[in-house]
């Protein structure tokens, strides 16, 4: 299964290596009460929320890291 910023949060979270990328860019996400509400969103969609403040460069770096997972 390949990952990218288009992958859903639930798919990313289910894989240990991809989860590390998720937690790197969204360090407090898994500890928020509404975490499960993000499962249907893509990494890209989640990055658009202002509280995460991901820059286009960070999103591109995350995409590269996710795509490198085999």
Image (cartoon, helix red, strand yellow):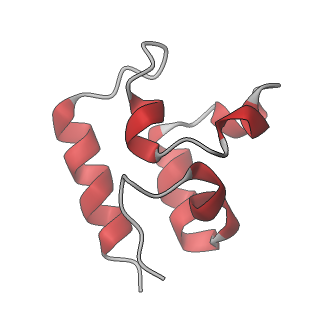
Give left or right: position of 7 versus 67.
right
In this view, the residue farthest toward the top is 50
Could you say where residue 39 lies in the image, as x and y percent from the top left?
A: 67, 45
Q: Residue at x 64, y 31 (%)?
A: 28
Residue that extends furthest to the front in the rendered view of this protein? 40
At x 36%, y 52%, the residue is 5
Left or right: 17, with 40 as reference point: left
Residue drawn where x is 75% and y is 26% of the image: 32
Q: Is residue 54 above or below residue 20?
A: above
Q: Is residue 56 above or below residue 4?
A: above
Residue at the spot x=77%, y=39% of the render? 36
Q: In which quadrant of the rendered view does residue 11 lie?
A: bottom right
70 to 32, vertically: above or below: below
Left or right? Give the position of 56 relative to 7. left
- Which residue, as the protein is rendered here, is positioned at the far left? 57
Check the picture and name the quadrant holding the C terminus: bottom left
Q: Quadrant of residue 4?
A: bottom left
**Numbered disc total:** 0
x and y percent of residue 58 in the render? 25, 39
Query: Horizontal and vertical percent for residue 61?
Result: 24, 51
Q: Quadrant of residue 67?
A: bottom left
Q: Please tell me which residue lies in front, 18 or 7.
A: 7
Farthest bottom residue?
70
């Amino acid at each position: 299964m390949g990952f990218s910023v288009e992958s859903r949060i639930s798919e990313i979270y289910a894989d240990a290596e991809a989860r590390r990328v998720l937690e790197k860019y969204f360090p407090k996400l898994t500890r928020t009460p509404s975490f499960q509400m993000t499962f249907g969103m893509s990494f890209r969609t989640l990055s658009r929320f202002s509280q995460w403040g991901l820059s286009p460069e960070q999103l591109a770096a995350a995409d590269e890291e996710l795509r490198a997972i085999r």
